[in-house]
Every structure is written in structure tokens, then in C-alpha cells.
Amino acid sequence: MVNRTSRTPDIHHMTAHEIRGKLDARDLSAVELTQATLKRISSIDGEINAYLRTTAEQAIPAAEEADRRLRGSGPEPGPLTGVPILVKDNMSTAGVETTAGSKILAGYIPPFDAEVVSRLNEAGAITLGKGNLDEFAMGSSNEHSAFGAVRNPWDMERVPGGSSGGAAAAVAAGECVVALGSDTGGSIRQPAALCGVVGMKPTYGLVSRYGLIAFASSLDQIGPITRDVRDCADTLNIISSHDPKDSTSVKAPFNDFGEKLGKSVDGMRLGVPKEYLVEGIEPGVRQAFEEAVEELRSLGALIEETSLPLTNQALAVYYVIAPSEASANLSRYDGVRYGAASTVGSTAAELSRHTRGEMFGDEVKRRILIGTYALSSGYYDAYYKKAQQVRTLIRREFTEAFGQFDALVTPTSPSVAFKIGEKLEDPLQMYLADICTIPVNIAGLPAISVPCGLSEEMPVGLQVIGPQFGDQTVLQVAHAYEQSTDWHRSHPPL
């Protein structure tokens, strides 16, 4: 049965800045909020399966420390001090099992925190646990987790999107206030759209990948999933910085990402690439997107159709580059040096073969095979090298578009959340779910998804894409649209 939307505000659906208001006014303590959220997880997550594990033993002392900071003892509190968060389980957390949704990492306890986790801990955020995901972040539905599928809190028979499905479902269900996801081809934005929350992929290199379990290193980027755009900007301010431990971390000027929030979009030039209104886009999604475009037009934005012809090549480029990098990154899991090991095999080669055969899921094996083939002798030039050449052309096409427009607007996903199992046996149809999000990762651009309507009583997302390091502009456009509508206040009653 599909849940009907509710806009009734309660503590489990407040934004981080609303919660901080209550914490500052002493209407609520961080300990009380943490205990209430842990209780909510205990009562509803058995069905949703957004969390792989909770960390109450660490969360309560962290909340006590946050309360002391909020009362003036210790470092100055920030926007997430005392706010409950979830971390996707492909980010290292010291002393807490980190599996990337795979059996091959079951029982792995990192000795260190990912850089983003360290920064959130320093900011006083309260980590409640680790979020479920498609194995090694490879998937668009969160059905590929070795620890069970995540269910969409709007309709338990549907997927939440992937691979950050646990993070998006938890925010939508009121099981945390903010979550960290990772986005390789849409894995933050697509589940955010399908679960009716906000999700942002920053410019590649703005957020450190140190401590992120790698899928495709030239595409992976960590970003926030939140209830509104302001929380997204506040979180990005905390987790963005140059990190010498990450060779891809940029030395960019880290300005306040919320600086342009509240500024008008009157006179801004917004492009609508016609290729993103793909054949097969659901009518309800198209209608919600067109209404969102008209809303932006009513706010004074100058909107014009444009064309990005190479968009149609982006999916093929992605499914050469990403599996190739995955093949290289996952070669470390051999049963000898790293990860769990099979009990079968008398030689290193046999042990490796049995370990991977037993412990990698079907989707991971599929992508390793594709990537290994693309990198193999005699095929490298025809596939991987060619894909990188087309990638350069896609970047150039975006650069030319941003010479004409301040930002681009598109649907986030061509469909609303589909039924669990509906596309599991058809990998191509599953891959097409990311057709609107993948080009952004190929070009390393910032993009955000914000709720823009309902179709079949399920959420629809509006995607705003900006030029490289145009993260502030992306947030400005998204915030202007969000504040002129009420969709971000909708949530599934649970």
C-alpha cells in the first residue's frame, strides 16, 4: 500500500537548523533527541532496513558532549552540533564495522575515520550508525546489498534508489536528520529524488575521499543528503576542505556554500537540455518537471531549451570507465592480503578464485568482468581509451553550455521509485535509471536534487547542474525553487 503524504511537523522531520533552534532554546537536549531517534530506528527500521548497524554506545556520550558545547563549555557549536546523522557504510569509521555492503568485508573494523567523518565529529554531529547500500556502491536500487534490500518509506514495496538508498530512506523516514552518501553516477541524487529529500554531489575534489572505500576513483564523490537546501549547504561547509591525504583533493577557495541562499534567481539564465527528457520518461515525472520549470520562470529566471548531444553517449562512457576502475580497485580483495577469505583452495590462486566467487555479489562480479575485459590487451584502445576521449568531449560540451547558462535544470530520474524486483533481472533497464545523473560525474560537476512533486503518490526530483566550482550557484537555484514550494515539507507518515 502506498503511504499518503503528510506535512505535519514533528521532531523526526525537522531540519537541522530547526533542531538547532530548539537545542539553543533549551526546549530539547541533544541526549533527548538522540535517544528519541534511536528509539524510532528500533521501532521502524526492521521493515525499512536503512541501517546496517547502530552505534548507541558512541552516540550517547557524543550527545552529552554536544550538550556541554551548547551550554558554552568547549569549542563553539556549529550548525550540526547535537544533530543525529547517518554515515553510508562505505566510509571508514574507527572501531565500527565497515562493510561497503559486501560479505567480503564483514567483520572489518577500520582503525581510523574517513576525513569527512572526522570533520563531522569535530563539528559535534552525533553519528547514530552506518547506512545500507548496494554492494561497493554498485547499483541503482539498493537491492544489491549483501545484507538485504532497503525499502522506500513512501511505499515498502518499492526501492529507495541506490546506491545510497539507506541514507536517503533514513532521512525520509525520520531516522536521522542528515546523512552522508557517495555519488559515482547518481548514487546521492537518484535515491534523494526517489525518497523525496535533498541530495547533492559537489564538484569533484571539493570533498576528501580519504577513507572512502573506492568504487571508481575518478568518479566517486561524497556529499550530503538532507531535508532542505540550507542543511545541505551547512553540511558541505563542514566536510569540504583541501586534504593532503587525498591526491584528488583540490586547493580551491572554500567559500561559504550558503552565501547565495535567499538570493533571487531573477535574471539568471537556466538551460533545459532536451536530451534529458528521454524517451520513456514517465508522464508524471515530465509533468512535475515542467511545473518546476514554470515555477522557476515565475521567479524571474530566463529559461531556454538547449542541446547536449553527447548526453546520449554518457551512459556507454560511464559503463566502460566505472567498471574498469572498479576492476582495478577491487583486485585487492583476494582472500590473501585483504578482506575475508574462503576456506577452500590449496594455492593462492585457488583461494582468490573461491573467495571472490563466494563473497562478491552478482552485480559486483558483472562490473569486474566488464572492466577487466575493457582493460585487457587488444581492447584497451578500443574501449577504455576511447571512453576517456569521449569523456573529454562531454566535459567540453558542458563548458560550452555554461558559457551561455548559469545553470542547467533536468529531471533527476526518468521514473519514480519502481517495485522491488522489477528490474533486478534486467541490468540494462537498471542502468538506464541513472541516465540523467551520470553525465555530471563524467564531467566532475556539482549537481543537486530537490523534491519537486509527486507522481503515483511517489516523490519526483528536480536536478540543478552547475559549472565546475559553481556549487554556490547550484545551491542558490535549488533554494529559490524550494522556498517557493512546499514539496520539501512532504514526508511519508510512519
Image (cartoon, helix red, strand yellow):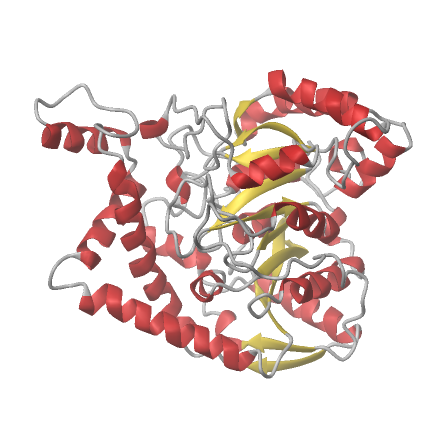
- Image coordinates of residue 40 in percent, x first then y, are 68, 24
What is the tally of numbered marks visible in this picture?
Answer: 0
Where 396 falls versus 37 (above or below)?
A: below
Where 303 falls versus 377 (above or below)?
A: below
39 with respect to 165 (left or right): right
373 with respect to 53 (left or right): left
- Image coordinates of residue 315 in percent, x first then y, are 37, 64
| Front residue (pair 129, 70) | 70
Q: Can residue 249 be seen in this view?
A: yes
Identify the residue at image location x=57%, y=62%.
446
- Image coordinates of residue 467 in percent, x first then y, are 57, 70
Q: Is residue 152 visible?
A: no
- Image coordinates of residue 259 in percent, x first then y, are 76, 60
Please identify the residue farthest to the front as the structure is shown.
244
Is the N terminus in the top left, top right, bottom left or bottom right quadrant?
A: top right
Please identify the residue farthest to the left as the structure is shown.
346
Q: In which quarter of the image is residue 257?
A: bottom right
222 with respect to 344 (left or right): right
Identify the residue at image location x=61%, y=55%.
460
| Front residue (pair 488, 268) | 268
Is the C terminus in the top left, top right, bottom left or bottom right quadrant?
A: top right
| Front residue (pair 309, 57) | 57
Identify the residue at image location x=74%, y=76%.
301
